[in-house]
Amino acid sequence: GTTTIANGVILTMNTNSSRTLSRPMVNNGRINHSAGYLTFGGGGTLTNSPTKIYELSGSTFLFNSGSNNTFNNAGIFNDHSTNDQTFQFTFNNSGQFNIFGTTVRVDGGGTNTGARNLASGTVLHYRANYTHGAGSTAAGSGLLSFNGGTQTISGNWTSTCFVQMLTGILDGTGNLTTNGPFSWASGTVTGIGNITIGPAGKLALTTTSSHTLSRPIINNGNLHYLNGQLTVVGTTITN
């Protein structure tokens, strides 16, 4: 069965205790989660419906236990929590994911086709295979980090925040346009889609590690080769 929070209803989690979700839940109202734990306990699916709000604040945690756990955010997911979060469940965002003061590590995979707004001092790490589809955006003064796995750019999207590729593979048929800084520390950038550096953008190779490029780069801004080894395989860099 499915638990549905009706329109106009507020689900409150405000005690320092543990809760386990092992069935589908649909939020058509509002969720205020200000204390304690919510554990996806196997077969737990939380769907935040379009325009609806999941408000995470205070000392709160989202945990994963078991398999087949998914958080689908089609609405507004605000992370005001005071501690870092690690999402080991599948996390799909087609709405707005707003991080205001912490580090969030997405370790369970999923798909993004919505907005990601990162406040100053925040970090959003993708550390497992993840798909970034058409409609995705990344904005704000925080940091979007590709830190492992294969990051698949499946559709065209634009980033205006600081993007960092620490390791792993960037692949896919979509075009990624950066209108902010893009720091490439190591790893492989491949696939038939472009990386376009916008007039306000900058792509910099920043470490002594190996960098492998087999994806077209179109530079309309700044391309800085500061350090390391760049191996270009069957592709073009257009300045």
Image (cartoon, helix red, strand yellow):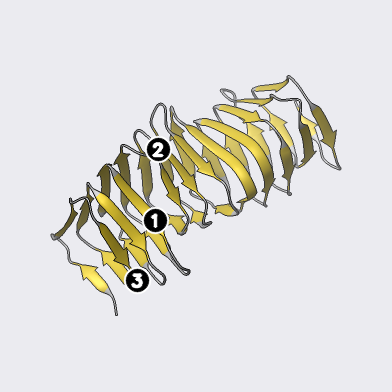
Which numbered dot is residue 63?
A: 1
Point out the frontmost of discs 1 and 2.
Answer: 1
Separation (CA) of disc 1 from disc 3: 12 Å
Disc 2 secondary structure class: strand
Where does the image place residue 66, in percent across and percent down from the top left?
46, 68
Farthest residue to the left: give it.
Answer: 8
Where does the image place residue 98, in percent across and percent down from the top left?
36, 41
Farthest residue to the front: give it.
Answer: 17
Q: Mark 2 packing: few (<14 Cα in 10 Å), some, or many (20+)?
A: many
Where does the image place residue 87, in percent across and percent down from the top left?
45, 52
Look at label 1 and name its amino acid.
Phe
Look at label 2 and name its amino acid.
Asn
Going by the image, does 22 lie left or right of 170?
A: left
Quadrant showing the C terminus = top right
Establish if 64 lies above or below 163: below
Disc 3 secondary structure class: loop
Establish if 195 lies above or below 5: above
In the rendered image, which residue does mark 2 sit on? Answer: 117
Are the residues flagged by discs 1 and 3 in contact, CB closer than 8 Å? no
Going by the image, does 225 lie left or right of 68?
A: right
Residue drawn at the location 47% of the way across and 39% of the way down: 124
**Which one is earlier in the sequence, the residue at label 1 or at label 3?**
3
Quadrant in the picture for residue 217: top right
Q: Mark 1 packing: few (<14 Cα in 10 Å), some, or many (20+)?
A: some
In the rendered image, which residue does mark 3 sit on? Answer: 22
Where does the image place residue 61, in percent across and percent down from the top left?
34, 49
Q: Mark 3 packing: few (<14 Cα in 10 Å), some, or many (20+)?
A: some
Look at label 3 and name its amino acid.
Ser
Quadrant showing the N terminus = bottom left
Establish if 181 lies above or below 236: above
**Which one is earlier in the sequence, the residue at label 2 or at label 3?**
3
